[in-house]
Image (cartoon, grey):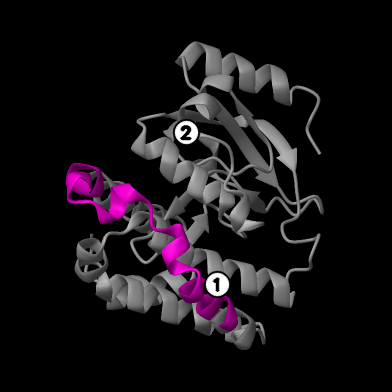
Amino acid sequence: MLRRDWIERLTSTVWKANSAFGVGKLLRPDGSDEIDGSWDLISRGAYAWRCGYGKKDGTVWSSPRSIHFAPMTAALFSRKVFETVGLLETRFESYYEDVDFGVRCALAGITGRYEPAAVATHMSKTTLGKSSYRVYFLSGRNQVLILAKYYSTRTLLRFAWPILVGQCLALLAAAKQRNFWAALRGKWEAIRRWRAFRPTAVTSSRGRDWQRQVESTFTESEREIQSLQRQVGFDPYWRLYFRLVRPA
């Protein structure tokens, strides 16, 4: 649910910053002052974080900033964004389709704005259920499809350890919610569909410059995850990830 001044505050911020899109702060609807989302980031291991999810609202989430990854829960876009990077990837169905869109924005140099004064309330994963088999199947599958879509063989080898750690920890996180098999089957389904998601820019030698840009995009995003986690306290997943993976 959008607060009455959501559109006014967000449009004002986007226009003043001359940005291509804008997102606001998402709070839980139960009045607990917990963040349900802000902007997204993704690690080199293709595990995404909806920044602030489950954290108490505070200073970190109350400062405007430039972003590339916009959660599609409540966002405002210029039509030019879609004309430049295309529409949402329907083959993802749900989960990570907006992260994929954010990767494309970052690669195209398109920036947006996070405006914390534009507040909406939202409770994630209520359509299918937080612990739904389908949620973990799609999330597990689409994490791997992100790798297929953007990582060349060279990048897969360079980032092999972060990918292995990130995906194994994702399976452990699913196991904690009693959905290990759902996540594992999702990853197997992604492997079966791997070739269908390999664009020419990834497999062609002419795509080397583009691939360096991909590596830079994921690396910078991971650095931001680590920085924010330090500020607000590490979630279990990220604590383990950054203990096992050398800083980007």
Q: Residue at (60%, 86%) from the top-left corner?
A: 180
The residue depicted at 58 percent of the width and 76 percent of the height is 186
Residue 181 position within the rendered picture, expressed as x and y whole percent measured from the top left: 61, 87
Q: Is mark 1 on a helix, strand or loop?
A: helix
Instruction: Establish if 121 lies above or below 116.
Output: below
Q: What secondary structure prevails in the magenta region?
A: helix
**x, y percent for residue 66:** 43, 31
Residue interval drawn in magenta: 185-211
Position of residue 8 measured from the top left corner of the image (x, y, whole percent):
70, 17
What residue is pinned by disc 2? 85
> In the figure, 186 relative to 9: above or below?
below
State the residue position of label 1. Answer: 140
Q: In this orientation, which residue lies closer to the viewer: 146 or 180? A: 146
CA gap, disc 2 and disc 1: 24 Å
**Helix, strand or loop at mark 2:** helix
Q: Which amino acid does label 1 sit on?
A: Gly
Vertical position of residue 13 compared to residue 246: above or below: above
- Residue 233 at least partly seen: no
Identify residue type, mark 2. Answer: Val
Q: Which is more N-terminal, label 1 or label 2?
A: 2
- Give the quadrant of the C terminus: bottom left
Residue at image location 29% in from the left, 78% down from the top? 244
Residue 208: within the magenta? yes
Quarter of the image with the N terminus is top right
**Which residue is found at the position 56% from the left and 28% from the top?**
22
Q: Does the magenta stretch include residue 207?
A: yes
Judged left or right of residue 89, residue 4 is: right
- In this view, the mark in front (2 or 1): 2
Q: 111 or 143, which is in the foreground?
A: 143
Does the image show residue 99?
Answer: yes
Q: Is residue 211 left or right of residue 130?
A: left
